[in-house]
Image (cartoon, helix red, strand yellow):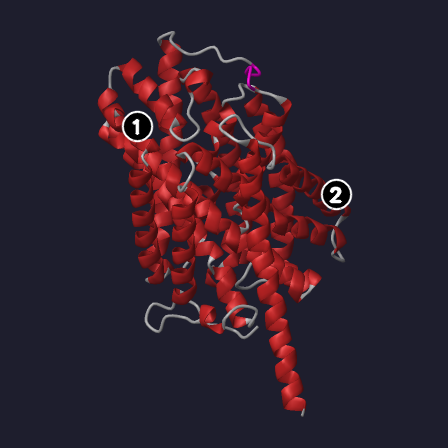
Amino acid sequence: MDHVAVPKTLGRADLILLKIVAIVNINNIPPTAVFGRIAMLLWALAFACFFLPEAVAVLVFAKRYPGEGGIYLWIRREFGDAHGFLAGWCYWTNNLFYIPVVLVYMAGIVAFAGGEGNADLVDNRLFVGGLALGWLVLMAVLNIRGLRVGKWIQNIGGVGTALSVVLVLIAAGIAMVKGVAQDAPMVADLGSTTGLAASFSVMCMAFIGIELASTMGDEIRDPARDLKPAIFAAGVISLGSYALVTGAMLLLVPIGDMGIIQGIMQAVSSGAKTAGVAWLVGPVAVLMALSIGGSASAWFAGSTRVPFVAGIDSALPAALGRIHPRYQSPHVALIVCAVVAGTFTVLSLLGSSVGEAYQVLLKAAIVIQLVPFVYLFLGLMKTAGVRLASRAAGLLGLVTTSSAIVFAFLPTPEVGSVAVFELKMALGVLGPVGIGWYLFRRAVQRRADSGSAKAT
């Protein structure tokens, strides 16, 4: 790959905030909290079986293969161009599903900003679609201006995430002091085996993100010094946030009333009413929306570096590898990602309720995003010079990731038609993967034809 000069703008504080906002996505909590207190144990299990092996892999490969591209670069070096492209393609295209998931969830939070009387807007597809597309355009424009500008969306989102977690915990504390906390069961009635398994796949995906900064490896000021403490801080904060906020939600909202999209705000609203400060619900909704919007921007900016690098490598159209002459950002890749993510947002809302569209987007994103981690853990197991403990971490991560992929295809209670859900899942997973493989094979054939033409 040709060297491309990009400005080094990410310091240690930026890395920590980027990892926090990328990992701690509280929209992952309501779909799992509905199964009862056992969800808190599952968060700890997902952390031990997925996050820790991922942390080992990221530290090993970031040191071995520094540079722009991250997981795409690592897998290409370990398994060759074809597998590297497929893994990078999946890492990118899953975010074309996941970013709409985050944007749809953000719209549900914003609905609370105008008070509970407007909470029904979460089911209004025009409101949800309009707000999601508006934020997508905003973060695309700011990231095109470069990470010096775009990183502040992520940084503000990281601060918003921390404050949101604190406010939810305060609301739960107030409910306990006043004796109005809910008595959640260990396992809810709807906590079937298949439902719990599907939730575990969501939890594994929720811990993905510590590798995101490495996709911008050339833009980190001092990766050797800053990556390890940033990963440690992100791990502690993410596990604590997921487990504690799950417990807080179970204290604040009856399981039967917990919505998968607006569940967090239900909890905050309940706590604010109990404390006699219901007027806080609107400002809290705005703060949490900024947190979620920052998460969307983090994944948008980071995952875009994959087609940017692949464009340089000629696996995708070379235009994707262009850098803006003024802002030094991969502006073509950013624009393409914004257009495709916007299209998926609109399509997901057609013919489905908002809740079901959310589930399909989320589960398809899980499967596609976990594919590169199958490669990552296989690479950790086979790489020469790696310690036995690291190889064991790779095996644990591989088993966990493979299981989570299977679990993602299990329908949840929000699904109206199992057949339609499975069909959308199949199309949502096989379609992007098939398109990526076709594009790669076409690029290989073109290079071969060009080489033959030159030879003659």
Judged from the image, the secondary structure of the residue bearing numbered disc 2 is: helix
Image quarter where the C terminus lies is bottom right
- The answer to whether residue 189 is magenta is yes
Tell me, yes or no, whether the two marked residues, 1 and 2, touch with CB atoms within 8 Å.
no
> Magenta residues?
186-190
Taking 114 as reference, is 400 left or right? Answer: right
Q: Amino acid at mark 1?
A: Asp
Rounded to the nearest angstrom, the CA distance separating label 1 from label 2 is: 48 Å
Residue drawn where x is 53% and y is 13% of the image: 185
- Is 427 or 17 nearer to us in this picture? 427
Image x and y of residue 392, in percent = 74, 43
Image x and y of residue 126, in percent = 30, 40
Which residue does the numbered mark 1 point to in the structure image?
A: 120
Image quarter where the N terminus lies is bottom right
Q: As drawn, which residue projects farthest toward the bottom?
A: 456
Q: Compared to 315, does 300 lie above or below?
A: above
Q: Note whether residue 159 is visible.
A: no
Image x and y of residue 178, in percent = 35, 8
Which residue does the numbered mark 2 point to in the structure image?
A: 392
Q: Residues within 10 Å of mark 1 (few under 14, many from 20)?
A: few
Which quadrant holds residue 403?
top right
- Is 191 or 48 nearer to us in this picture? 191
Q: Note whether residue 167 is visible.
A: yes
Image x and y of residue 21, in percent = 43, 43
Judged from the image, the secondary structure of the residue bearing numbered disc 1 is: helix
Q: Compared to 245, does 106 lie above or below?
A: below
Which quadrant holds residue 395?
top right
